[in-house]
Image (spheres, grey):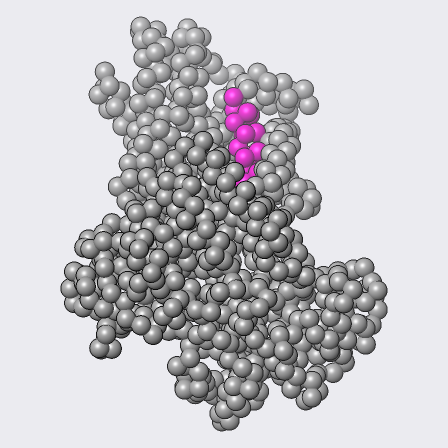
Amino acid sequence: MRHIVKPLFRHRMMPLLVVLQVALACAIACNALFLLQQKLVPILTPDGVGHPDRLIVAWDMIPKGQPWPAPRLLEVERALRGIPGVAAVGMAGALPMTTNAYMNGNVHGDGLHAKGDTSVYIGDHLVDVLGLQLVAGRDFSAAEQATQYKNIGINDNGPTIITQALAEQLFPGGDALGKVVRIGDDADAARRTVVGVVAHLMRNKFGQDDRADIDYSMLFPGIPGNWPIPVFGIRVSHAAEAAHVRKAVKAIVQRELGTEMVQGIHPVYEMYGDLRNRMLARSKAAVWLLAGVSLIVLLVTVVGIMGLTSYWVQQRTRQIGIRRALGARRGDILREVRAENLLVVGAGIVLGMALTYAINLWLMRHYELARLPWPYLPYGAALMLLLGQLAVWLPARRAAGVPPVVATRAA
Amino acid sequence: MFKYYLTLALRRCRQNLPMVALLALTMAVGIASCMTALTIFRALSGEALPGISPYLYVATMDAREAVDKDNPDYKQPDSYVGLVDARALVDAHRARQQAALAQSLTTMGTADGKRSTQAFGLMAYGPVLSMFGVPLRYGRPWTAAEQASNAPVVVIDTRTALKLFGTEDAVGRSVTMGRRGFRVIGVAAPWKPRMVFFDLQRNQGNVQGQEQNFFVPAQAALDAGVGPFTSGECGKGSDIPKISFQSAAVANCRWVETWVRLDTPADVSAYDRFLSGYADAQHDAGRFAYPPHAGLYGTQAWMTQNHVVPDDVHLNLMLAGGFLLLCLVNVAGLLAARFLRRQGDVAIRRALGASKRHVFVQHLVETGLLGLVGGVLALPLTWLGLWIVRMQPVSYADAARFSLGVFVILLALSVGVGLLVGILPAWRVCRQPPALQIKLA
């Protein structure tokens, strides 16, 4: 071991540069990959919406002055239901991926402590419209769907359907059906009885962070009152009919509400799949950017280590020749160069991990970023060690190929 | 001598082209990524209104007049107050200039109804044009008397004037807003701040400033049925719901914000005391339901507080900076290896009488040249990077434009990087004692 460690201290610059490179690469790649993982969360989380190519979303229609009263909106809904090819129509305060408004509440089971920051979707026929998969309980009854709230509805009592993830969070291991969920901490906070559980339903404000509660949502039946930005969801029976239904939806909404809208802001009528792609485009772009950066960082590091090691080997050709002449086998030389690389890269990793952690702490303080999960460190270390070995493969083979006769040549 | 070193450097570069290409490309990628992030950062930092915004401050306070059970805490400083309070603050004349304002979006038309256009503009109380330095092409701003008598007057910009009247000089004409005709008393040049800084709630999601097509006294606009874009926060006793759009029934809402111009730190602290005094007095008198926590925010602090520039912009700049650093270390290492391989040549030069300094300069010239090559390669890469950013669905995509300033920075950065990267290897190579090197060689 001594003959591996000692030269490192005699010629400090080369190993030092490798250490520095590995440390920097480690710090950049770990933090970039962590950011990337967070950006992936909303992309990879199932949103619960079935057949996105059959759902049309009409939104961003904004009434001038007073919100449209519920009866007006129900009339529009009826007209939309009359379009041939339509399977279900619903109106809601917001739907997944519509981002101009969202309703959130901190909810907990009645008498229980576990809480969840939950998105609330208030509207009628939402299970059918969104194509949600009911895993327990029932859908809302026709009477429940017909509720008209005086206000938005978030402070009213009634039934609710929640996601499996939320059920697990609020009532761990138990059956959520029939339990009461409360919105907010006040003594007179609204009480909602769970009548059904759906597999998934994504919240509509996912932001940029890796949230465990991205699948915490609940549905309330009925029409939110005094709500200025209604959203219509229209489900068609066959994807092939979507195009002409979309045109008809646009015509009806424009005819019914067009003149009362804020001029200059145009309503959007789009397929849910397109809406989802549009809303996630930023996250996707960031994922590509961060993946590209991480890849280039690692590539640059591998090339750097390779260049430095091959010089380092070339410098010591004579010494290697002497060692070979004195009886070292090719395998010994190969192992030595690799062990040396392991040592140097290892030192870089230790420094790099400290740097990674420090950068993460700094980012947490100045930006709204989460703490780096600890598994990143061992995985990052393993990756760097592997890359180090990969980079040293060629120079090591060249070193091992030095014939013993070199020792006999004059310097 | 310099020219000789340059030809020497060129010749050496030609000896090992793949290596040189690798070095230059590594530098180029580092420089280009840094330049891309820096271009966006530069476009989104600095003064929102050059020369003016550093002296502008916004007044914040918890001016809620009723207890809000769902939301009792005052977590974020709030700039919205009712028009009554905004008027009191402006009329107190405690700052050099002061005006209250709110973003509006409305339809403007000619009196005959033949032409109309959607226009963004400011409803204001106070001399907002002179405070923000909006340049007037024709006419004049409204007077205090016109404002006091709620006279229906308006200042429009040349774009709107052209659209409606076909001429820029529209002074004296009449435009219809809401239910009423407004006399045009002034025409401003097209104006928008570099970045959004006022009425951030109604300009959410924007980074770059919104062009303002008209400026109108707030009360006159309300009288005509023209309201702010959203109603702000409306308290009890108002017949309009929590959120509504373009409503002029905002008597019970907090919907305007007050900006003041303060030139010296002493003025700022004096105004801060005045503001706290005013707000506390309202609370003591029972008007404000909560302790008001009044505060003044400078333009930059207010923009930071409200995250106007997305965190991504800063994070990407740091990422790019870190990446450039890595590239530098990498290139320094490869260069050191390259130089040290030629120790024999250096030793002979030294033995023939070249001083350490000469050797050092010779190697720096070589790395400087490499830096320049890297910079030239970085130019198309930066252009490509900016093009990619422009294709992205981000609010600041428009800021990613190549400009002369960017080019100058890039040039300086690449030569600087080239020299910086060469210092360590050049120093290392000229430190060798000549005699030993000749023997080894």
Residue B49 picture location, percent across and down: 34, 45
Where residue B224 sits, quadrant-wise, is: bottom left
Q: At 52% from the left edge and 24% from the top edge, which residue is drawn? A: A14
Q: At 35% from the left edge and 28% from the top edge, which residue is drawn? A: B416
Foreground pick, B400 / B277: B277
Where residue A25 sits, quadrant-wise, is: top right
> Is residue A270 visible in the rendered structure shown here?
no
Foreground pick, A98 / B280: B280
* In the image, residue A120 above or below residue A195: above
Residue A18 within the segment the image draws in magenta? yes
* In the image, residue A195 above or below residue A29: below
Foreground pick, A185 / B290: B290
* In the image, residue A59 above or below residue B35: below
Q: How many marks?
A: 0
Q: Is residue A368 left or right of residue B402?
A: right
Q: At 31% from the left edge and 23% from the top edge, which residue is drawn? A: B365
Residue B333 picture location, percent across and down: 46, 28
Q: Quadrant of the C terminus of chain B?
A: top left
Foreground pick, B12 / A277: A277
Residue B154 within the segment the image draws in magenta? no
Q: Is residue A108 left or right of residue B210?
A: right
Residue A49 picture location, percent across and down: 60, 75
- Magenta stretch bounds: A13-33
Q: Quadrant of the N terminus of chain B?
A: top left
Where residue B425 sits, quadrant-wise, is: top left
Magenta span: predominant SS is: helix
Residue B180 picture location, percent across and down: 31, 72
> Is residue A75 visible in the rendered structure shown here?
yes
Q: At 41% from the left edge and 53% from the top edge, which residue is drawn? A: B100
Q: Is residue B331 left or right of residue B273?
A: left
